[in-house]
Image: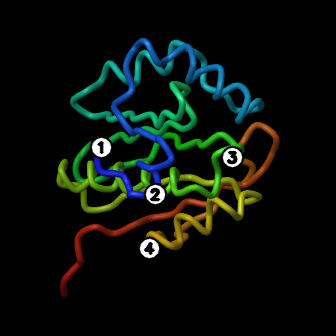
């Protein structure tokens, strides 16, 4: 997977998530999303569905520092999860992972990529806006703590008249 020269110099690698990665990813999941963390088995179930899913991890110094997943059932792709540990935010890892997920959606011939983002997470919202996502809906009280989810969409195929 292609990374920016800056990330390569920083020793960050991006690769497909494996079953061996799941325990470490689940620890990060509980740390980063304590109220909404996925259970361990859910990660195993997700990565097993290779026909409709793609999960990646970013490593630095032998440690997983980010992970993300995409579900694609034509014509829609959906970012299932994306996370970067706080110590590695702002280094381009989130952008690299999101680029990989969007590229995967294109390879799977998706027309659109959808995602949910917490209404109280402006950093993530700005990342998605830079990639061309637009907010199309709000899901009130979507998260367990009552926070709204913003539904965002990136159109990959132009809709012609």
- Determine whether the residue tagged by mark 2 lies in a helix, strand or loop: helix
- Determine whether the residue tagged by mark 3 lies in a helix, strand or loop: loop
Residue wearing tag 3: 142
- Name the side, left or right, on which 27 lies relative to 96: right
The label nearer to you, 4 versus 3, is: 4
For the point 43% across and 15% down, the residue is 44
Name the quarter where the C terminus is drawn. bottom left
Question: Residue 16 placed where, x, y %?
Answer: 34, 31
Name the quarter where the N terminus is drawn. top left
Q: Do residues under tags 3 and 1 come within 8 Å of each other at their CB atoms?
A: no
For the point 47% across and 37% down, the residue is 58
Residue wearing tag 2: 6
Nearest the camera: 98 or 117? Answer: 98
State the count of labels.
4
The label nearer to you, 2 versus 3, is: 2
Residue wearing tag 4: 132
**Which disc number belongs to residue 72?**
1
- Determine whether the residue tagged by mark 1 lies in a helix, strand or loop: strand
Give me the C-alpha separation between circle 2 and circle 3. Answer: 36 Å
Which of the two discs, 4 and 1, labels the residue nearer the N terminus? 1
């Amino acid at each position: 997977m292609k990374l920016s020269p800056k990330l390569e110099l920083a020793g960050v690698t991006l690769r497909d998530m494996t079953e061996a990665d799941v325990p470490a990813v689940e620890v990060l999941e509980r740390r980063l999303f304590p109220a909404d963390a996925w259970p361990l088995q859910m990660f195993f179930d997700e990565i097993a569905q290779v026909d409709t899913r793609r999960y990646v991890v970013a490593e630095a110094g032998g440690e997983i520092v980010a992970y993300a997943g995409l579900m694609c059932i034509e014509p829609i792709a959906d970012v299932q999860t994306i996370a970067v540990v706080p110590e590695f935010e702002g280094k381009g890892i989130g952008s690299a992972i999101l680029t990989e997920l969007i590229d995967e959606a294109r390879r799977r011939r998706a027309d659109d990529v959808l995602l949910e983002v917490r209404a109280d997470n402006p950093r993530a919202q700005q990342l998605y806006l830079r990639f061309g996502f637009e907010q199309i809906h709000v899901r009130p009280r979507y998260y367990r703590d009552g926070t709204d989810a913003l539904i965002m969409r990136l159109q990959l195929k132009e809709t012609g008249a």
